[in-house]
Image (spheres, helix red, strand yellow):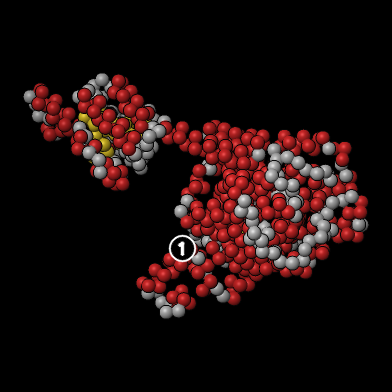
Amino acid sequence: MSLWRRLTGNDTREQIHFRARLARYFPITTWLPYYNRHLLNDDLVAAVIVTLMVIPQALAYAILAGLPAITGLYASMLPLIAYTLFGTSRTLAVGPMAIVSLMTAAALSPLFVPGSVAYSQGAMTLAMLSGLILGVMGLLRLGFFANFLSHPVVSGLLTASGVLIAASQFAGLMGIGGSGFTLIDQLAHLFRHLNGLHWATLILGLAALGFLLFMRRAAPLLRKLGLTAGAATFIVRLGPVIAVAVTTLVSWSMDLPAHGVKVVGDIPAHLPPLSLPSFDPGLLRELLLPAFLISVVGFIESVSLAQMLAARRRERISPDQELIGLGSANLAAAFSSGMPVTGSLSRTVINFDAGARTPAAGAFAALGVGLVVLFLSPLIAYLPIATLAASIIVSAMTLVDLPGLKRTWRYSRSDFLAMLMTIALTFIEGVEAGVMAGVGVSLALYLYRTSRPHTAVLGRLPGTEHFRNVRRHEAEIDEEIALLRIDESLYFANARYLEDTVYGLLADRPAMKHMVLICSAVNLIDASALESLEAINSRLKDSQITLHLAEVKGPVMDRLKKSDFLDHLSGDVYLSTYAAWTDLRHRLEERAAEANGTEPESESR
């Protein structure tokens, strides 16, 4: 049977199984067999719009990374085609991104002279390592790794990175060479070199910056002039392209490079040459950690954005396959004279709004970038660096989430502390330190919260089968029966805390005869927690108290059955709290009746 027929033929069991296996590693097979003229038209329109956005951004981000401007364009060709083959998001636009560019510069600047051949080869090596790390994580199905950075920490990292990126470009806006990858270093360098301010560059840069800020808020004005909402939005998003075109024309007509205004300069009019990263063991060791951090940050940003946009169209993405897609894109960049790449926030949103229907839009955009490099590169030579700096500043400030800081402060002080620590360390030590601090703080917060799980002593709401926290509700209790609900999975970090909680309740209830642990929120009991349960059971048995369990979930019960805990459990396992309550109350009434020589109250009724 031919491959095409197996992809598009009738849904026999063999074909369904074949397509599922193929789609696992080649998501392109899920949409390419059904590609048609309508999809092609939508993707081409989106590709044209994205191509116009890619050019100034790719140039700017390459310069931000300390690389020749053409590197950004090279990284916007083959990586997009690789992602088209292996990525699952239909709208994610892959390429250079601000935070990744800043992290690239921070990793390479201590090792090489920015702009040198060795520096460019270092960027390719960084892309190769990042691609391999992402690819291996994808094959091992480690897409869940994104969960190790909490949303407040990610928000703090983006906010701090936005400020860092913007601060790094003020020097370019003023015609001063930039330096440093921490906020303190950048500001200190700026103040030390204020006497080197180039007025023509500053005027041009401020004009570009003012225009870009105006365009961000120009949509309502354009609507008042009679334009449709779609046309107004399109013009607003063309702001960076207009700024690039106008300032380049001014630079060329007035020969501003002759007056000291720094420009992009000559760009080779050829497609990216195939290249080899460095395989020097020493360099690989130096770049391994930065590559890992770049991979983590890039993946988290990409998959979060891709999932959000996919949900709007009722599509889905696979985080594990996204790792492979982004890994293949970085490997393509490594062997085509590029730099580390990931999903771009601004270009992805534009790609989505422009109507991209499949990943083919990215491949068409790559083709568009290639045509620009081949035929329009002489026009870019006069593009002022100050214009690119202004474009980066405006783009970076969209990462700053001040309302998020306020919301987090009001909702959770501990999350706000994590966010604040991430921001502070990013400012003081750089993005890499911020990422590591973010992961560490996120894990520390998780361990702290789960090591002290919320527990509640329950009572019965009168006349119902419902049980609630006695501290929050007027509930019926029985001093001889303690109902303790555990609101967290039980594992090594909170096993001792559970013992202390139970023993504390034992001290507060001297008349207790039965204790019921309500496990409705317990999804896991590890070996350490099992030992604690065994110790609790033994201690309660010595105190003439029977231990029972209620509402144990199926997977947890399956694990318990593999141990001998249930054989030694002094009490029973109940399906519901109400069943435990009624049965134990009945037992106590029977015992009281036997002691008094009367019938149990429940039976007499």
Which residue is depicted at the point 74% across and 67% down?
Answer: 270
Q: How many marks?
A: 1
**Which picture quadrant has residue 546?**
top left
Residue 594 in percent (x, y) is at 9, 26
In the image, taking residue 237 as reference, residue 553 lies left or right, namely left
* Percent position of residue 385, x then y: 80, 52
Front one among 165 and 66: 66
Q: Is residue 22 above or below residue 581?
A: below
Residue at x 27% of width, y 38% of height: 550
Reading the image, the residue beneath label 1 is: 24
Residue 387 image position (x, y, % from top left):
80, 52
Q: What amino acid is found at the position of numbered circle 1 in the picture?
A: Arg
Question: Looking at the image, is 537 positioned above or below residue 439?
Answer: above
- Nearest to the observer: residue 154 or residue 470: 154
Quarter holding the N terminus is: bottom left
* Viewer-nearest residue: 376 or 518: 376
